[in-house]
Image (cartoon, rainbow, N blue to C red):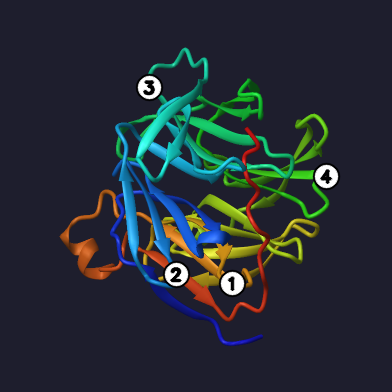
Amino acid sequence: MSSVKIEVAVKEHCKLGESPVWEEKENSLLFVDITGKKVFRWNSLTKEIQSVPVDALVSLVSLRKCGGYIITQGTRFASLNWQNKSVTTINHVDEDKSNNRFNDGKVDPAGRLFAGTMGNEIRPAVLERKQGSLFTLFPDHSVVKNFDCVDISNGLDWSLDHRTFFYIDSLSYSVDAFDYDLQTGQLSNRRSIYKMEKEDSIPDGMSIDTEGKLWIACYNGGRVIRIDPETGKRIQMIKLPVDQTTSCCFGGPDYSELYVTSASQGMDAAAWSREPQAGNVFKITGLGVKGVPSYSYAG
């Protein structure tokens, strides 16, 4: 095992940093600040950070095959043109719950975007339970609801053979697996494959490595953990200097760098003095494993 190194990659102090995704052709990391209502792009070569402000809570950013990006804002899917900073609606989800919003999401190997909703927080850390759903945006821009009764729709990824879909509903403190039909995008046979340890706290964003193991950012746990979905065992834990770790993705020239987003929401002066790096994006190197490139939305 090589020596693990943790450093700040992007100094941004996001309120709620989320949805990191590596864009290979730009040597860049994309991510969002949900409550800061901004999409960021950090160039790993020049260290330049650019951002596009948007007019609603923006919870994910993904690559698009036709160029530009796709984002979720409130309860709509939208395209983002980075050059002219314009946002164009692609579709809305039919949510009869006016205070719902999108949260995490990811593109599958066939170019469909999976994204889930959650109830807005009534006050910090208190939200309406079971208000969310998991949706699929197909390349033809049609939307399908996969299931509902979700608390906080979070981390998602696919097994290396694309036959299993991994998913986190954060307040279940569980990582679940579904059988996945890549031809249709249909999910079946839901089961729990990992129950969080108490000290891990809340499971948030997730990413798979080339060995088929899952890396999970633990919100309020200040760590990322690596689990084996076959055995249901935690096999590694990396502690970070901030508590509110939110999501992670692999990137860098050979996908050997793990980028971890974090949040600074709700912190008082005492918390800031303990965690002056809260809200930044961290880079972990020396893990000895690599990740899988992101898929691009095909619509």
Q: Earlier in the sequence, mark 3 or mark 2?
A: 2
Mark 4 or 3 closer to N-term? 3
Residue that mark 4 sits on: 163
Which of the pair 160/214 is nearer the observer?
160
Asked if residue 101 shows in the view, the reply is: yes
The residue that disc 3 covers is 99
Label 2 neighbour load within 10 Å: few <14, some 14-19, many 20+:
some
Q: Nearer the viewer, residue 150 or 158?
A: 158
Q: Where is residue 213, by image quadrant?
A: bottom right
Q: CA distance from mark 3 to mark 1?
A: 40 Å
Q: Position of residue 73 (x, y in %)?
A: 41, 32
Which is in the foreground here, disc 3 or disc 2? 2
Question: What's under tag 4, amino acid-wise?
Answer: Arg
Judging by the rendered image, the residue that carries numbered circle 1 is 253
Measure the C-alpha gap from mark 4 to mark 3.
Answer: 34 Å
- The furthest residue to the left: 269
In the image: residue 47, left or right of residue 283: left
Residue drawn at point x = 32 percent, y = 37 percent: 54
Q: Residues within 10 Å of mark 3 (few under 14, many from 20)?
A: some
Three-letter amino acid code at disc 2? Ser
In space, the residues marked 4 and 1 are separated at their CA atoms by 27 Å
Check contact, mark 1 vs mark 2: CB within 8 A: no
Q: Decide: is 3 above or below 73.
A: below
Pointers 2 and 4 in contact (C-beta within 8 Å)? no
Residue 290: image quadrant is: bottom right
Dot 2 lies on which element?
A: loop
The disc placed on residue 44 is 2
